[in-house]
Amino acid sequence: MGWGDLGAFGEPSKETPNLDQMASEGMLFLDFYTASPLCSPSRAALLTGRLPVRNGFYTTNGHARNAYTPQDIVGGIPDSELLLPELLKKAGYINKIIGKWHLGHRPQFHPLKHGFDEWFGSPNCHFGPFDNRASPNIPVYRDWEMIGRYYEDFKIDLKTGEANLTQLYLQEALDFISKQQSSQQPFFLYWAIDATHAPVYASKQFLGTSQRGLYGDAVREIDDSVGKILKHLQKLGISKNTFVFFTSDNGAALISAPKQGGSNGRFLCGKQTTFEGGMREPAIAWWPGHIPAGGVSHQLGSVMDLFTTSLSLAGLQPPGDRQIDGIDLLPAILQGKLIDRPIFYYRGNEMMAVRVGLYKAHYWTWSNSWEEYSKGIDFCPSQNVSGVTTHTQEEHTTLPLLFHLGRDPGEKYPLSFASEEYQQAMERISIVVQQHKETMVPGVPQLNVCDKALMNWSPPGCQKLGKCLKPPESDPKKCFWPH
Amino acid sequence: MGWGDLGAFGEPSKETPNLDQMASEGMLFLDFYTASPLCSPSRAALLTGRLPVRNGFYTTNGHARNAYTPQDIVGGIPDSELLLPELLKKAGYINKIIGKWHLGHRPQFHPLKHGFDEWFGSPNCHFGPFDNRASPNIPVYRDWEMIGRYYEDFKIDLKTGEANLTQLYLQEALDFISKQQSSQQPFFLYWAIDATHAPVYASKQFLGTSQRGLYGDAVREIDDSVGKILKHLQKLGISKNTFVFFTSDNGAALISAPKQGGSNGRFLCGKQTTFEGGMREPAIAWWPGHIPAGGVSHQLGSVMDLFTTSLSLAGLQPPGDRQIDGIDLLPAILQGKLIDRPIFYYRGNEMMAVRVGLYKAHYWTWSNSWEEYSKGIDFCPSQNVSGVTTHTQEEHTTLPLLFHLGRDPGEKYPLSFASEEYQQAMERISIVVQQHKETMVPGVPQLNVCDKALMNWSPPGCQKLGKCLKPPESDPKKCFWPH
């Protein structure tokens, strides 16, 4: 989902009354970022409070490459990483993940081995479908074992776009919340639905209800579901001690437009890129009685802050033995403070850009290769900012491209290198970047090796279901990351 | 000002608290259009309820050319046109225009000859400055006579962007409203400030207050002024019988970006074009106690509807002896009805496009000529939709380019001509267009002839001020309209 997909963020169809109401009862974050322009690294960053380049969710197979956890990935979240639920456990929290995990699907990466107490969902994204010979369909887990597979036991009709996945995830969320409320135990629910990812789906009751086509139907269903979760919290009388945050893991995938692509508003490009369209996210904080209603924040925020902020809410300190990139947003949320901090835009192993205040400096630019582009793979459709949306990797480390995101949120007009404004801004930014680079200790890259033998052929529980598949022989290879 | 310039419409800096509040207390129109992608014709349409091609605010000097009323224009609003204030007079209204008139500056076109009782403002736009020999500065009128000129008596500092014009217009509005309230007379106030037009200006107290630079400062000042006007109505106890509508005369001029250009959100191109960015406008209706708070309407609306709607509010009928293009929006505003009606996108003498429901069909496309474009005149900066943002006038009358504005508000993905969706939509649209063309009786074009001798050399009142200038000899010529 992209920055521009919600009514509160200017989507012209304005079809998200529940999320818009969540914003009007809570706080809208207009300058909130993910830590990577695609799924797995973004989610790893959210749960560890650390940049993917630190927690290992990146590749060194190529320079500045986007990498994630497809079915044949060998790596996943290292045991050495401390995940939010692991830490929350210490404060007595019960932790549940509903939906897409995406931090590795081999046994050692199972969410219940990384702090979660419960899981209903899938290790990888639902795309496919696959057949049972070349590649298995993605399994759906309940806790330790699979209970079926997408397209087989959990229907996704690619023709009509119909699927009840979001409804299943919603019901699971409502049940979990009810259970926790009656047991009086504090809980952390990571509601990581994979809806709006292509191939897009929605429940029957939402199909055709949007002006925006199937993608809009999916957004409406998410909107409706969030509304139901918030109402449930209110009905149970626990809204005043439940902190809720809504955001997305990357910008809308414009490559899926117009049929399945969302909106990044007026921002440049989309998913896979380090332009604003790829990394600035819709974000809403909600906590009635604590967060002033109708608040709007220009705090530079990150999904990694949800780690630190959640710990703070639970009365815990972030681990002191490692670099944590997330900050505690509570002063911004509760007292309207603005905390000075930079935002780093990474693509794989490269810091492509940095934002300090309203200035964004691009040290590297790349949308994708000419080769891909010539095949119609376009992350910036009908957008071409000369020298900015480049199809070769362009280094600007000695003279970064600088934009003022207030006057020019669309990153169309680089500041003149000769201007005083450029000099002054870059002076400040250079110090931030230098500090960042000097203290950077990259983690062991987890997304380098792929092996078809490690796909979801026979996940735990497959025998009970008669759904075990025979893997091919092991053949580990460098994963190919084209962009 | 463009569709995307207000917080309520998704401007990322969200700096318009008063207009956003106006929206939350009133009704937001998301599908509201001007009748022309530039100033004079748009304003002529607003005041007559008729398309510029009917009321004469167009040119036949070239095909599909944008034309307006610069200082050397010979034409203006014909006496045969019935303007909103002329009609409102019959219901006892006192009518005032504050700001830019732009319907001709020769004596016969004076606003007080066309129904207004009072005027404080200018006949043309404030751009310049000019010197007193080649061309006069634009006069500022109080009622029948000029009281000074821009840049001379009414300062606009191009270096700092400082001017107190909006403050003068605000004070004039507050005074007029107070006067009308005490005399118990119904009033029509046309608050036609020219702020946000380049060269952009703002008052000292607003300079530097926006994240968006000088343009944002000007928007903030407008926002603040609208807030003060609404509060004034409330303080005087007349808000419940005062209907207020906020909109703009064309999309943001992207050619003035980044320093002086606004935002059309995610819509394509800007001012001067018949793409959404040129003609879809921010629009808010406000009438406490009548309009449900927080309303959102997808009614296809037009500035021309303000003519018919205002007459309806005053208990008057629109004139029956001519084609009126505006419709009465009250059923949409008060009862949430959706009235089926098309929107026509004209550029000069040509119907470039039409919107019916969510479909928009382009019969002609043109941004501007290659010649202009090669000189850096770009109405669609960094946007290039192949075959859509064309630099030659492209005729598509036999097979219009069709877009679904719900799925594709950015007009990037024309529907396949072979698709069933195309066939069905075009069947409906063709009937609408055929009817429109069959009944179209164009007015006498007013914007064909220019003559430097007719500029504002010696407006009425100049003698008292010692500000009469000597005109050159008359030399009427065809005006040159490059785009």
Image (cartoon, coloured by chain):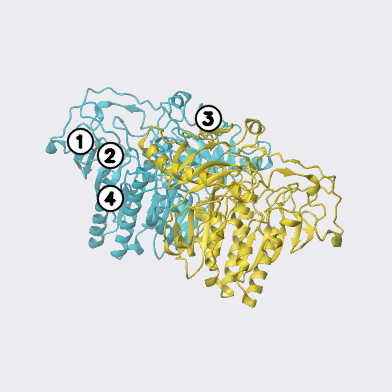
Chain colours: A yellow, B cyan
- Mark 4 secondary-structure assignment: helix
Along the line of sight, the residue nearer the viewer: B170 or B80: B170
Element under label 2? loop
Residue B205: mark in rendering: 4
How many numbered discs?
4
Mark positioned earlier in the residue sequence (1 or 2): 2
Q: State the residue position of label 3.
A: B390
Which numbered mark, 1 or 4, is in the foreground of this view?
4
Q: Calculate the distance from the C-alpha at mark 4 to the C-alpha at mark 2.
A: 27 Å
Q: CA distance from mark 3 to mark 1?
A: 42 Å
Q: Position of residue A15 (x, y in %)?
A: 56, 56
Give the Cα distance between marks 1 and 4: 32 Å
Which residue corresponds to the image point at 61% horizontal and 36% vertical from the top-left?
A368
Mark pair 3, 2: CA separation: 34 Å
Q: Which residue is mark 2?
A: B123
Question: Which residue lies under the disc numbered 1?
Answer: B459
- Chain holding disc 3: B
Classify 10 Å Cα crowding around label 3: few (below 14), some (14-19), many (20 and above).
some
Q: Which x, y percent locates residue B185?
A: 26, 59
